[in-house]
Amino acid sequence: MKKILVPIKMVLDANMRPRVKADGTGIDLSGMKLSINPFCEIAVEEAVRLKEKGLAEQVVAISIGPAKAQDSLRQALAMGADSARLIETDGPIEPLAVAKLIRMVVDEEKPELVILGKQAVDDDCNQTGQMLAALLDWPQATFASALRVEGTVVHVTREVDGGHQTLSLPLPAVVTTDLRLNEPRHCSLPNIMKARKKALDVTPVAACGVDTVPRLKVLGVKPPEPRKAGRRVADVSELVGDLRAAGAI
Amino acid sequence: MTLLLLADHDGHTLSDATARAVSAARDMGGALHLLVAGENVEPVAKAAADLSDVDKVLMADDPALAHMLAEPVAELLVGLSADYTAVIAPATSIGKDILPRVAARCDVMQVSDITRVIAQDTFERPIYAGNAIETVQSTDRLKVVTIRSSAFDAAPPGNASAPIARVSLPAGAWKARFESEELTKSERPELTSARIVISGGRGLGSAQAFQTVLAPLAECLHAAIGASRAAVDAGYAPNDLQVGQTGKIVAPELYIAIGISGAIQHLAGMKDAKVIVAINKDADAPIFQVADFGLVGDLFTLVPELVHALG
Ligand SMILES: Cc1cc2nc3c(=O)[nH]c(=O)nc-3n(C[C@H](O)[C@H](O)[C@H](O)COP(=O)(O)OP(=O)(O)OC[C@H]3O[C@@H](n4cnc5c(N)ncnc54)[C@H](O)[C@@H]3O)c2cc1C
Ligand SMILES: Cc1cc2nc3c(=O)[nH]c(=O)nc-3n(C[C@H](O)[C@H](O)[C@H](O)COP(=O)(O)OP(=O)(O)OC[C@H]3O[C@@H](n4cnc5c(N)ncnc54)[C@H](O)[C@@H]3O)c2cc1C
């Protein structure tokens, strides 16, 4: 195939503990480490592996987000993507609008395969790939744990509630990644240097002609109810006594 | 106001997640119709009709619906959606796969994985692995919502059966094809609906230890077995047992975490359990911060002792 498109999102690093803003309007990201969403990193890795196997000629990464999301795109380039595009927006943008913007890019770039993360670990929506597939009227395989391209067909094994399921999709198609699809590579310094020279095209969202007005109103964000502190038990018999007293067993 | 709920099932039995989603639908108010899609699903439709608060069951029986693949089921739901104010589904692997496809086709923004209904159009949902709870209001005409089952109780059987009406799948050329499936067989209770869950982590050290150390405890407590991502990645347990932000979300009466450190992504899947027990040899493991009862020590001696004490 000629081209794979990989949409990536920059999110709060998975190792950071999110803090709710005191005014209850969202999460305080100031001074926090932002990284490429882990599922998107897996998507980039899979696309690059397909290219390395000679099954794809070109990998294009795209992100919709603030100027800083260029850092995540540079990481994708260092992993082996050939070029990158940022659709720049500072405002909040929902999966439906993201899917519409990606569809616009699909119309321009004409990839045969789009690989996305199954969910972004900040908003945990788990929607964008499915929405994109619907808008394009392409087949979809979500939660992929294995992927094999054979001519113009992609065979995808999916992680489902009861175990695994394998589907075959004629290209063009949309795939979303689960955790066990691959282990993303670490970027070497020479590759990071090389990535600086690769093309990264920036388009302001206003130039896209896509309706991005949010449909959901966030009325508030609060921390979860804290659990009341527990205690240590000295041994198994104390534990069994406590569990019986609590009616748990 | 009428809501349409996509029933989750495995072709034979209606899942517990469906009964829980019915409770969420009842909180949203209005009449409730359940859609049972599949092949030879009459028994499932009958079970759906027996749930309380269900006013009508729509049954779509078609070989093309056999594996509930996204394209045909979404098409069916899009066709039906004009008559409804909301299309909802439990956030199972089926619901998560299909509903966003319906939402995009209807030009609606989905509200994912809600844990509470505040009003017909306003919901609470966890974000950032449950480290924050967001209250969102949908401004779309049609509401498309997935339900986190662990946050709702299962609807009980009703007094009378709801009527069952057949609906047909519009003709279409579905592109994705089903090839095969490998389902984990287990005699144990299902993870997301079990009263007690015993989970093992990397501390177990092997797939064998899941069998020799964890299984006897699960047996004597009639518990389901779960696992951390590290345990699944290492091949100690199958993928469908993973508990956490990116695995299954559970809220049992009792959760026993064994050899699990308590990373936030794991806590996201179990911190709403009523009682949490942690067994870990590291007294500083973060799991102890959420545990009601913490036992510090070697799991290879403590777990057999526990089995013995319960025996
Ligand atoms: C600067 C900024 C601030 C925001 N502030 C808020 C806020 O305060 N409150 C709020 O509720 N929402 C806010 N949002 C919106 C929120 O980020 C969206 O809900 C989110 O973009 C989509 O949800 P998700 O990432 O969980 O989607 P999912 O459907 O879980 O994402 C799945 C996959 O889709 C792809 N994808 C998703 N988003 C993008 C993207 N932007 N670019 C490229 N690929 C993508 C990735 O491959 C990802 O792995 C903000 C967004 C931005 C950009
Ligand atoms: C995007 C993303 C998504 C993720 N999603 C999930 C998810 O859904 N679910 C999930 O679980 N994780 C998830 N993770 C991984 C998570 O961050 C942790 O890496 C994982 O939960 C660790 O598993 P663990 O506690 O079994 O292993 P470890 O952190 O290695 O902990 C093992 C524990 O066992 C104890 N131990 C060892 N030997 C013994 C013994 N003999 N007796 C008693 N105790 C012993 C140790 O003291 C230690 O605390 C995700 C990570 C990312 C980045």
Image (cartoon, coloured by chain):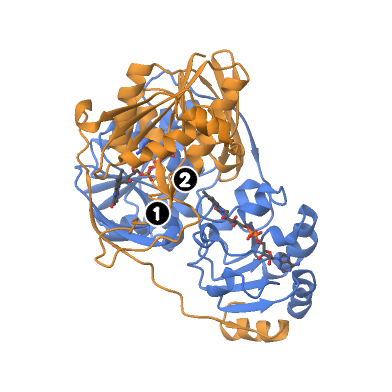
Chain colours: A orange, B blue
Q: Position of residue A1 (x, y in %)?
A: 52, 14
Above or below: residue B311 compared with residue B247:
below
Q: What chain does mark 1 sit on? A: B
Give the residue displayed 58% in from the left and 64% down from the top. B262
Q: Amino acid at mark 1?
A: Ala
Locate residue B202: give its quadrant: bottom right
Q: Distance of mark 2 from mark 1, alpha carbons?
A: 10 Å
**Toward which corner of the image does residue A144 lie, by quadrant?**
top right
Which residue position holds label 1?
A: B21
Tell me the chain of label 2: B
**Is residue B150 visible in this depiction of the protein?**
yes
Query: In front here: A141 or A57?
Result: A57
Left or right: A15 with respect to B112?
right
Quick check: A87 left or right of B231?
left
The residue pinned by badge 2 equals: B8
Q: Quadrant of residue B58?
A: top left
- Neighbor class of circle 2 (other Cα within 10 Å; few <14, some 14-19, many 20+) is many
N-term-proximal mark, 2 vs 1: 2
Element assignment for label 1: helix
Q: Residue at x 24, y 66 (%)?
A: A23
Say whether marks 2 and 1 touch (CB < 8 Å): yes
Q: Depth check: B185 or A73 in front?
A: A73
Residue nearest the observer in this picture, B74 or A207: A207
What residue sits 33% from the left and 56% below the top? A30
Is ligand 2 less than 8 Å from the beta carbon at label 2? no
Query: Taking A229 as reference, is B72 above or below it?
Result: above
Instruction: Please indicate, yes or no, whether residue B154 appears anywhere in the rendered image.
Output: no
View quadrant of ligand 1: top left
